[in-house]
Image (cartoon, rainbow, N blue to C red):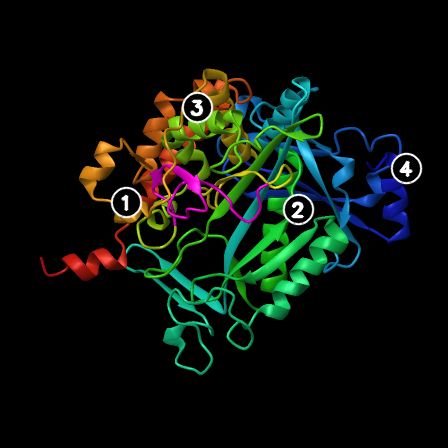
Amino acid sequence: MMNPQEVIKAIKDNNIRWVDLQFTDLIGYLRHMTISSRVISMENINDMLGKLDGSSIKGFTDIEESDLVLKPVLDTFNLIPWENGLGRMICGIFIGNSRFLKDPRYATERLDSYLMEQNLKLFISAELEFFIFDNVKVSIDTWRQSFEIYSSEAPWNGTAFVNKYKDGYYSIYPKDKFQELKIEIGDILTKFFNIDVEVVHHEVAAASQHEINFRGGTSTFTADSIQTIKFVAKSIAFRKGFIATFMPKPLYGDNGSGMHVHVSIWRDNENIFYDPDDSYAGLSQYGRYFIGGLIEHGRALSAIVSPTVNSYKRLVPGYEAPIYLVWGKGNRSAAIRIPGYKRNGASIRIEYRPPDPSANPYLALTAIILAGLDGVKKKIDPGDPIDENVYKFSRQKRKELKIKELPRTLDEALDELESDNEWLKPILPQELIESYIEVKREEAKKILAYPTPIELYHYIDI
């Protein structure tokens, strides 16, 4: 925990001339304003240091109530090592002296407090998958919609040492041309941002798909870490002339990028998801009810954890992305799995696989936990586990087993969220839910209005 004296000292000792005040909007974009360190003092460092126009940020406020202020969270002070004399702090958003209810970070803060009041402690982490491209060109106007993706690792590149489609998993240099860049990102996150990066590796997709794993913690810490990892990865890649993207499905015909979320809940240093007497997966009844909540609310949850039009191009059969709301141990065709590496009290956890890294992490992590806790509260039976490849089930078999599918479009997911959101109410206010749905409806409507290259390819001669 950093106190005001420590932050002021760090600013002086490191000759920090400017400080980025960072916050996250409703959609999940990291935003900032930069203030001179000269205006920060012991007298005001715990006060509102930044002022912003909330009406200019989609989903925040109307023009008549637009004055919002930023209050820095001192624990999040870090140096930004690639900028000379620049630091950063993540901020909470306030309206007057009260917390702004649509501040996404406020959701995880409230969730962590909510669990603490019940003598529960959450341990949550995420695997972030992303692509690094050599270049991306996009043209959108009234008469031309096109994009070109350049990847020196891709099979279409035509050079030696490229990855084959769906065969990039754990590839090494020189096929993994960004090993050094990944390690640099991991080193910066660990040294300067207090994020314990544990693993970096090449992922399945040929055209330079990668993954970063880090040690998690509370929902607020983990959401902050996700935003920071995206910020650092994109910044370092761009400074070296590359494009790092966390878009779920930038390429047809190969795997998309997910953000698998791992959850365990503890009470008095005991993992209450663990039952040593459970012969199937070492999973307690509490854990099974938690899974029941994820299945029960999975279709509505999809609007928050898979929140873009592009997300649903990832959630299709054949690319390891889950589309069926079933659970099992070690089963990667299931939306929920119990990783099978170890079976003990420290390691038993639930992995929720539908999310992707386009999600607002503060809202996504909060919604995942609330869905699970609703299952515990209502003792929702998740049904029998499935250890077979669900993609190979016939439609009739899925129907007999009453297997629910994730929505196929963002609009369908938003319909589900609109009709099934009471389970979010302990933490997320109605006005945030309504604003989120409204902004996402507008986004989907705008994007779906554009013809795409594949539509012209199929229909130009109709």
The image shows residue 360 at horizontal and vertical percentages of 52, 39
Residue at numbered disc 4: 5
Q: Which residue is mark 1?
A: 449
As helix, strand or loop, the secondary structure at mark 2 comes to loop
Residue assigned mark 2: 215
Foreground label between 3 and 1 = 3
Instruction: Choose mark 3 or mark 2, whichever is in front.
Output: 2
101 or 97, nearer to the observer: 101
The numbered mark, 4 or 2, whose residue comes first in the sequence reads 4
Mark 2 or mark 1, earlier in chain:
2
Nearer to me, 273 or 249: 273
Q: Secondary structure at mark 3?
A: helix
- Specify the quadrant that holds the C terminus: bottom left
Magenta residues (range): 321-343
Label 3, label 2: how far apart the Cα atoms are = 33 Å
Q: Which mark is residue 434?
A: 3
User: Could you tell me which residue is drawn at 70 percent across and 19 percent down?
Assistant: 97
Q: Main secondary structure of the magenta part?
A: loop
Q: Earlier in the sequence, mark 4 or mark 3?
A: 4
User: Which quadrant is the N terminus positioned in?
Assistant: top right
In the image shown, does 395 or 385 lie closer to the viewer? 385
Q: Choose between 182 and 55: the one closer to the eye.
A: 182
